[in-house]
Amino acid sequence: MEAIMAHRIDCIEKDDRYDPTQAIQFVGGRNSDGTRWRISQRDAIAGIESGKWAFYVLAGGRRINVIVAVSRFGNKYIKSEADDFSPNNLLNLQSCSFAA
């Protein structure tokens, strides 16, 4: 079985929604050639669930996997492992519009 390469998420685009499970609209990062990539949260969820993609964030010098979670209302969203919203490693990333 082929290993899945994990992609680092280093920026997000979010709504100003109060509910952190619905705030992230897009995530982004940098390819090995230096170009930027950006995908919707919906596509990231589908990629994780299908085994096509894996993602992580760096927080405090540590690599933390990004997983799919389900809100109490049944909505799927992505978050970093062991992330109880405080601090929220994904929501604290810079905006992709500034991640040149």
Image (cartoon, helix red, strand yellow):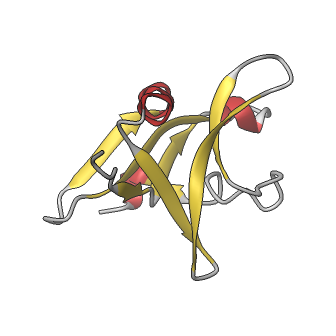
Q: Position of residue 56 (x, y in %)?
A: 50, 58
Q: Is residue 95 left or right of residue 72?
A: left
Question: Depth check: 10 or 53 in front?
Answer: 53
Residue furthest top as drawn: 74
Depicted 29 relative to depicted 46: above or below: below
Q: Quadrant of residue 35?
A: bottom left
Depicted 32 relative to depicted 11: above or below: below
Residue furthest bottom as drawn: 61
Residue at image location 57% in from the left, 57% down from the top: 65
Q: What count of labels does the image hold?
A: 0
Q: Position of residue 27 (x, y in %)?
A: 45, 44
Q: Is residue 83 left or right of residue 36?
A: right
Q: Position of residue 53 (x, y in %)?
A: 38, 42
Depicted 2 relative to depicted 72: above or below: below
Question: Depth check: 84 or 4 in front?
Answer: 4
Q: Position of residue 57 (x, y in %)?
A: 53, 62
Residue at image location 35% in from the left, 36% down from the top: 52
Q: Is residue 89 left or right of residue 9?
A: right
Residue at image location 32% in from the left, 55% down from the top: 5
Q: Quadrant of residue 73?
A: top right
Depicted 96 relative to depicted 49: above or below: below
Residue furthest left as drawn: 33
